Image: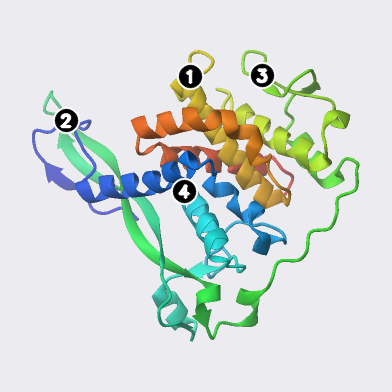
Amino acid sequence: MTTQPSKRQNRSPNSHEAPPAQNDLYARVTGKIMADLENGHLTWRKPWQAEHMAGHVMRPLRWNDIPYQGVNTLLLWGTAAEQGYTSPYWMTYRQAIELKANVRKGEKATQIVYADKFTVEDKNDNGETVLSQIPFLKPYAVFNADQIDGLSDEFYKKPEPVKAAAPSRNAQLEAFFAQTKADIRTGWDASYFITMDRVQMPPFESFESPESYYAVLAHEITHWTRHPSRLNRDLGRKVYGDEGYAKEELVAELGACFLAADLGFEPMPEARHAAYIQSWLKALQDDKRFIFQAASHAQKAVEYLHILQPS
């Protein structure tokens, strides 16, 4: 959705500030995630940790089976785990009514966000007309299908139990990562070297389970998408451990979780990321918008990996 341009005189196109309501929204969402991090929890990991989600974890879905994206995925996963919802479906009050269903009295909605851009006309310092794309956020409320009566049975399907994995490589996952054509080599640790454009993984046999191997690989392959020949993701990383490093690690963490949900395996155990939490907290304290940006970067990375697959 793009509105008709409006005219604003004598303003630089770089001078636009988010209105207070949007800043409050960024702060509220970031504050919730920071509070979880301070308690040692990764909000987006809760679906895999919760007992009620013993089945296959998947993306939150709209009523029409279109997955939610970006930060909304994190918010809805966290709420589902906290409240014990097993349905992946979410919808607005009006959408429930249109489906001839009704939200049960007393049920509490979950606030998520709608993101878009609008176009404005400005005058730059030389008096020239410049068009600018201004991003905006708008909060809206959704309910899980488990809070709604009268929907068709498909909205209430329980996840299938997860079958125990055989202690061998997973052909489907092997094919997915092979189709990326990434240069994946065996080495002594898990890492991505951007100068050589190479992913390095420890031997498969050194992992506790096949799922652990693919979880680590998902993290590193998300890093792989940052190369200038792919998504050209530059978050200001200069040296190991700086703020840009922390931001890129958060993107890779979320990308691994999104990819795990899409492909049907559990991401790296939370304990493996304990060392990153403090650096993520610092990055989020310094930039209230970054959790939104990180989720968006992760979403784009996973979409890129899917595009590389044969149709």
Which residue lies under the disc numbered 1?
Answer: 237
Q: Please give the name of the residue rendered at 72% of the width and 28% of the height, measured from the top-left corner.
A: 182
Q: Is residue 302 visible?
A: yes
Q: Position of residue 129 (x, y in %)?
A: 17, 34
Q: Which mark is residue 71?
A: 4
Q: Residues within 10 Å of mark 2 (few under 14, many from 20)?
A: some
Q: Position of residue 8 (x, y in %)?
A: 12, 41
Element at label 3:
loop
**In 3D space, how far apart are the residues under numbered discs 1 and 4 (Cα atoms)?**
22 Å
Q: Amino acid at mark 4?
A: Val
**In 3D space, how far apart are the residues under numbered discs 2 and 3 (Cα atoms)?**
39 Å
Q: Residues within 10 Å of mark 4 (few under 14, many from 20)?
A: many
Element at label 2:
loop
Element at label 1:
loop
Q: Amino acid at mark 3?
A: Asp
Q: Please give the name of the residue rendered at 71% of the width and 66% of the height, measured from the top-left corner.
A: 159
Which residue lies under the disc numbered 3?
Answer: 197
Q: Nearer the viewer, mark 3 or mark 1?
A: 1
> Residue reaching furthest left?
10
Q: Answer with left or right where residue 159 lies relative to residue 116.
A: right
Q: Nearer the viewer, mark 1 or mark 2?
A: 1
Which residue lies under the disc numbered 2?
Answer: 12
Element at label 4:
helix
Pick the residue in front: 248 or 303: 248
